[in-house]
Structures are given as structure tokens and as C-alpha cells.
Amino acid sequence: MSDIERLYSDRAGKMRKSEIRELLKVAQDPEVISFAGGLPSPESFPISDLQGVVKNILSQKGSVALQYGTTQGLTELRDIIAERSCKEGMNVTADNVIITSGSQQALDTVGKIFLNPGDTAIVGFPTYLGGINAFRSYEANLAGIPLDKDGMIMDELEDKIIDLKKKETPPKFIYVVPTFQNPAGVVMSEARRKKIIDIANEHDLIIVEDDPYGNLRYDIPHIKPIKSFDDENRVIYLSTFSKILSPGFRLAWTLASDEISRKIIICKQALDLCTNTFTQFIANEFIRSGSLDLHILKIREMYKPRRDIMMDAMKKYFPSGYTCNKPKGGMFAWVTLPEGIDTEIMFLDALKEKVAYVHGKAFSVNSGGGRSMRLNFSYSDCERIEEGMKRLGIVIENKLKVLC
Amino acid sequence: MSDIERLYSDRAGKMRKSEIRELLKVAQDPEVISFAGGLPSPESFPISDLQGVVKNILSQKGSVALQYGTTQGLTELRDIIAERSCKEGMNVTADNVIITSGSQQALDTVGKIFLNPGDTAIVGFPTYLGGINAFRSYEANLAGIPLDKDGMIMDELEDKIIDLKKKETPPKFIYVVPTFQNPAGVVMSEARRKKIIDIANEHDLIIVEDDPYGNLRYDIPHIKPIKSFDDENRVIYLSTFSKILSPGFRLAWTLASDEISRKIIICKQALDLCTNTFTQFIANEFIRSGSLDLHILKIREMYKPRRDIMMDAMKKYFPSGYTCNKPKGGMFAWVTLPEGIDTEIMFLDALKEKVAYVHGKAFSVNSGGGRSMRLNFSYSDCERIEEGMKRLGIVIENKLKVLC
């Protein structure tokens, strides 16, 4: 091959490795206590329940569960998802549900159907890295809107939209993770959920609401999705089985208007024909047997003490000067360290102490987040969390000493 | 939503529904004998073998088999695929293997990393519809090269490349299904396999070799893949578990040079993070237990008589004037009917007689193929094939009567 570069598309030239995926590789050393990935606890997987479900599906429905399925997804699974979504206040039928191969595929699809090269999408600052990668793979420009403890700041959002319109680069959509945000852990307030709908209505924009963590709440009651206030059907809502059943199943779902759903389905036909049929059957049985709801309760009980241990250990082992809002749910704590610390550089010190995290810049569409880091508390058990936080405290302390 | 069209990307505006996927919906009526889909026989699924494999995986490896995996795919599975590929004459290691969510995802990825809007890719005429859809979703122009009984015609290929270069639209790659081609059923000769490598070397192009059916051979010994002659590492080879294990598992693999593999992996990170881990573990165990090789023999024994019945029934029931090369493997027979028949229009008559096929134009990048149709012989059992061909014979006969 003499000159392969010449053959690549423009977008391929701009594709970057996901830093988190690379970090996960490093953190595979069993001696490293990793707060880096966004992994559920392996102890959380409902293996014995699945044994029964899978056995029945193979013996009773094998001939369809192992066959190609429709692009939109298994009808029975879409039915039950629609039913549950209605209970959460979202006005949808099974026709509005599309099963995707993880929410990442939904993000890719959103990018593919909305973004021309040079188009602008609005995201959080910070925001989920997988969203950044998906949208950038279509050569989009991303504008980051800061968050506070109540989620994306609406005044900043409005100003940015007006500014972008003035520059004749109006945004196509607003991507938001409103509940236990990845990475910041915050929850968007109900007032802002209504406000973001008003803003999208006024400027005629799409909202992409990514909600992988809504069920993982530890101190607060159920939070209404933005889509439950969506009177003009402009919200594309994404959720997933990755955090409540198994990420290995690669199963997620999208709720969207009839019109947008049709477009997503046509797009998905060319992406992978259909999502894994076998695991769709498994998820459907798992929900209908009542196991999923019981399992969600079990996961909450497992993760809540892990979050508490992490927050307590932070107080105990971290030198003062850091900030961190206690997350009310989800899988992540977002820590900002004192001025002068660069968490990307500090990562090498952390690895030497056998502890890992993701540095804040990875979640930023500009150069911000340099003093921050994302800590996952779902993957490791309480003992390892305590030990890992202790190690991380030492790393930070040593870093601060050098700075003084 | 006032004006959603305004928000779609240029590529979204050009996305078309897959005609086959739409036809599959129509053909779901159990009274219709469908030769339309590219579905394996549901009786071919190795359900009892899978029961044991799945049970062991859940009990022994559940904590990793249900977790996120690496983007490139399960190491053990890549190892065994590399080993088997080497036996077929391809010079690869596990580093050159990427597990994809069906070969359709590999086709999408190839489109994404190579094709700018307006770029040209070369395909067969006719060719696999899923390839057309994937490449067109990146706004590519497709140039179709005719086939004869020995596959893509090399003189026509060379002329087309020279012509495209003159027009300053040199092609990026050649997409070819050399073995039991979909839809034409033909096998590219070894001489042409060597020749296409020479042509790609001379013009410095990529070859995308799609080989889903290579194992489904009924009358001939193993055929060396084009990639086994690939002395400059420019062939991206695709194959799949869909036709030899289960399409519902959505598992396929790509073999490519180190450089191209790196690019595909980065691209795939943003597409779906990783392929279904659970079914990767299942496939790995299924191969290593020796079940896959036994199963392939079983499928060949199941499909060969179906092919024979279809060819015999064609002679018996079709009015003279059609042409069809007896396929030596794969899942499809390609029939061209006498002048004056339009198989797209005739499809409605066929549905009235409760029999379905895919009309030839669906596989064409221009307006050709209007007299042809693709008949699948893997899905239905011998009895239904006989009955379906009888019905189709009547449809064609009636059509010819009207023409006279």
C-alpha cells in the first residue's frame, strides 16, 4: 500500500481515539484500582435469573430469537418499553420506540442524520465523551454550555443560540444528559427541564435527551424526563439496558416522533440491519417476568453505599481545597482540584500509585476541565473504593507539595 | 415541530429504505412462500448445542461475558479467527481481526472512513443491496461492473478505472462478493482473483472482499479468498457468523492491515463502543468445542437438496426462455426472464399467488436488472420450495401470455 492516507475520507482524518477506551486498557492491570471506566459492577449481573430466561428462550423461541429481526426491533420489547415510558409521563407508542445497539449507536445515528460538516451542535460543558466522538465523526462543531448544580445553565444556552444564529451557524440540536450527568453527576432541575423545551420550541431545534442513569437514584424520587414536557415532539430520548441489566448485551432504545423515527430506522438499516435479536428476546423476558424492577432495586442498594464510601473517603483522604457535589444517583463523582493541578499530567502519578480516573479535559469540547477528574463508584466494591481513594489522596497531596 | 426537513443533513435527505427489508415485512404472511429474504433456515440453528454453551458461559464467565468489551473484540475469538484464516491462506494475526456487529457494520465503516460526498466506489452489477445502501449513505457515486459466470469481468473493471481517472473521479475501492455472489450466485475464478489484485496494486486501490457464503459450498472444494493473494495488504476481508451460526447474534469479522485496522477501530468506537460481548463469548466457545465445523457440514447437507429442488422445479414449472446458472454454493439463484417482463411489476402478481422474490433492479446501481430476480433457497424447506416454484411458474406464464 503506497499511500493509504490519500484514500481516507475527510472525516476519517479527523477521527480521534476515545481517551476513555484507551484508559480502560491501562486500567486492566488487576492491581490498579480503576475509577476510570463507566462500568457497572460485575457482581450486579443477574446471572441466575438469566440462566432460566435464556434456557426458555432457546427451547421455546430459538427459531426466531436466533434469526434476523426487523430494523426497528422486537415488537414485544418495544411494546413494554412504550408502556413503561408512558408511566414516566412520555406520550409514545411502540411505533415511537427503536431498539439500538447501545445508546452509542443512537448518538451516531443522530450525528449521521442531522450533521453536515461544519454544522454546530450544542452539548454540555463538560459532557459525555461518546457524544463528542459521535458528533465529531461527522465533522461537526460543538459548542459547550456550562453546568451548575442544577444542570445546564439556561441563560448561557439562550445566549449561545442567539450568538450562533447571528454568526449564521444556527445549531441543529442540543445534546443533554439531564439526570446524574456524565461526568458532572448533577441533576437538571424541573424548572430548567421546562425551560429547555421552551427554548427549543422558540428556536425550532431538536433536543437529544440521553438518560442512561435515571433508574440509578439513591436519595431522590423519580425525576420526570425532559421528554415528558415535550409538547411539540422535538425530543429524541435515549435510554439503555447497559446500566440496569448488561452492557454486554448492547441494547438501548430511542423514543422519537413518527417522522424522526422513520429517518432513524432508514439510517439504521444501513448501519447494522438490526440489533442483536437474541439479547432483545432475553431483555423482553427479563422485564416481563418482573425481574428487571427487582434488579434495579438491588443495584441501587449496591451502589448507594459505594457512593457514600467514596464521598466519605474523599473527605478523609483528599487535602482540602477540592470541590465535589455529592451525586444523588448515577455512577460518577466529579471532583475539581485546587488551582495549579493538571489532572491529565497527574494521571501518570496516579498510575504509579495503582489508581486510575479520567481527567476532566476528556469531557470538554474546548480546553476546559483541566483541574477536574471523573471518579466512577459503581465498578469497584467498597473496600477497593476506600483503598483507591486513599491512594488518590496521596497522589494529590504529593502534587500540591510540589506546587507549594 | 415546524420544519424538521431544514435540520436534516444532506446525506439523510438521500437515504432510501432498503427494498429488501420492506419486502421482508410483506413476506411475513405465513401463507406467502418467500424466496425474498437472505435468511438462513430456522431449522439450521444449533439450539441444543447452544443450550450447553450458554449455560457454561453464564455460570463460568458471566462477569466478563455480560460486561463491556474492547472495541476490537474478544481476544480469544480473534485468536481463533486468525488461526482459521491463516489455514485459508490469509496472512493475518489476531491484531488484524476486528469483530463487527454484522458485516453490515463493516460496510458502513468502510463507507465512513473512505468516502467523501461525490467519491466513487466500484461495485458489481448486480451487487449486494446492503453494500449499495451503506456506501450511498455517505453520498458516494457507485460504478457497476458487469459479471459473467466467472464473476466480475476484469477488462470492464480496468476500463472503468481508467475512465474514472480520466474524469478525475478515481475510485476509492472495489467492493466485490467473489464467492457465491449475492445476488448472482457466481464464483469468481482464481485467475480473476489474482487479476483483481494486480489491478488494485497497479492503481493503488483498496479491495473490499465480502465473503459471507464461502462455507456454504455444495459441489466444489474450498475456494481461496482474494485476500490470500494480497501481497500488498490492500484487501479488507469481511466474513460473518450470520450464515453459519445465527444472524440474530449480529457477529461478523473484518481482516485488514494494521494501519487500516487502527482506523476501523477508532471509527467503531464512535459507532457502538463494542460488539455484543455475550454472543462473542458464545461464538468463541462454539468454535473451540468443534461444534462450528460439524454444524457447517450439517448446513451444507441441508441446503444442497434445497438448491437442487429449486433448480429442478425451475426446469419443470418455468416456461422456457429464462436463464439461470446453477449456483455451486451460497443461498441464491439469479434468474433472468424473457424480454418484456419487468420483475418489479410482476412482484404484485406473485404476491397474489402467495410467493415472493426480490426483483433484480434492487441490486443495481443503475437501471439494469429489470428482467431478473433473486430467489433464496436456504430459508424454505424442500416441499415449500417445490410449491413456491410452481406458483412462480404460473405467475411467469400468465405474464408471458399477456405479452404475446
Image (cartoon, coloured by chain):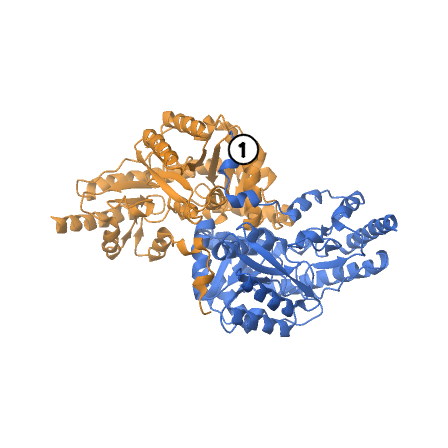
Chain colours: A orange, B blue
Amino acid type, residue under disc 1 in the picture: Ser
A43 or B17, nearer to the observer:
B17
Residue at 57%, 34% (x, y): give it: A258
**x%, y% of residue B301?**
71, 63
Residue A178 picture quarter: top left
- Residue drawn at point x = 43 percent, y = 39 percent: A212
A291 versus A133 height, above or below: above
Q: Which residue is the site of mark 1?
A: A257
Relative image position of residue A322 (x, y in whole percent): 21, 40
Residue A223 visible within the image = no
Q: In this view of the protein, which residue sits in the foreground, B160 or B265?
A: B160
Is A338 displayed left or right of B69 in the figure? left
**Residue B129 falls left or right of residue A38:** right
Residue B119 placed where, x, y %?
Answer: 52, 56
Name the subunit of mark 1.
A
Q: Residues within 10 Å of mark 1 (few under 14, many from 20)?
A: many
Drawn side of residue B25 relative to residue A250, left or right: right
Along the viewing direction, whichever of B389 and B64 lies nearer the viewer: B389
Quadrant assignment, res A321: top left
Residue A395 in sight from this viewpoint: yes
Q: Out of A309 and B122, give the one closest to the viewer.
A: B122
In the picture shown, does residue A21 fall above or below B235? above
Q: In the image as oriented, which residue stretches furthest toward the left?
A: A404
Compared with A197, B357 (above or below) is below
Q: Is residue B325 shown above or below A400?
A: below
- Percent position of residue B354, x then y: 78, 45
